[in-house]
Image (cartoon, grey):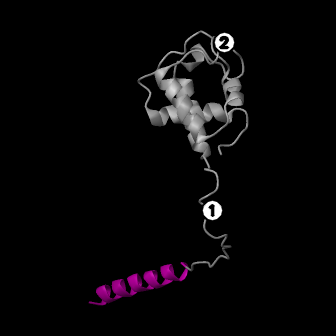
Amino acid sequence: MKKILTLYLTIALVVVFASCGSKTENKNVEDYGAPDESAAPVVAVDVIAQGESLVNASDCKTCHHKENKIIGPSHTDVAKKYEFTQANVTLLAQKIINGGTGVWGEIPMTAHPDVNQADAEKMARYVLSLDGEKEH
């Protein structure tokens, strides 16, 4: 009986001492209010990084280089030509999926029907970010 009482007392002391060190700190947190929903959309950096990974894993580099014209325009030249807007993200995503011709000359851009809309938009956002412009 004495062993059981000692065991319970030891467990109780451990619980008491363990709980003593678990004080929570109250930190001063500044409240800046709710975000302005009417502001331009903010694209997370990881979406741009995902787009870059998708571009690097695709056959884009066969015809496009980040800074130099190969068969098609450089991705930086595309970024300079198109304003970084949702409308242009959608437009360029459709060009990635469906291909196209005539905007940069007579050499057609190959269609990529296996790329889904969401991934194509990530790729387009990456390309449009290359001139340093933020999406608005």
Asked which quadrant contains residue 124, the reply is: top right
- Residue found farthest to the left: 1
Q: What residue type is disc 2 on?
A: Ile
On the image, the x and y values in percent for residue 99 come to: 50, 19
> For the C terminus, which image quadrant?
top right
Q: What residue type is disc 1 on?
A: Asp
Q: Residue at x 40, y 85 (%)?
A: 12
Confirm whether residue 95 shows in the render. Answer: yes
On the image, the x and y values in percent for residue 100 come to: 53, 18
Q: Which residue is mark 2?
A: 70
On the image, the x and y values in percent for residue 24 come to: 57, 78
Label 2 sits on a secondary structure element that is loop
Lateral position of residue 5 relative to residue 20, left or right: left
> For the N terminus, which image quadrant?
bottom left
Q: Which residues are magenta?
A: 1-22
On the image, the x and y values in percent for residue 14 come to: 45, 81
Lateral position of residue 3 relative to residue 112, left or right: left
Q: Which residue is mark 1?
A: 36
Label 1 sits on a secondary structure element that is loop
Disc 2 crowd rating (10 Å Cα; few below 14, some 14-19, many 20+) is few
Is residue 60 placed above or below 89 in the rendered structure? above
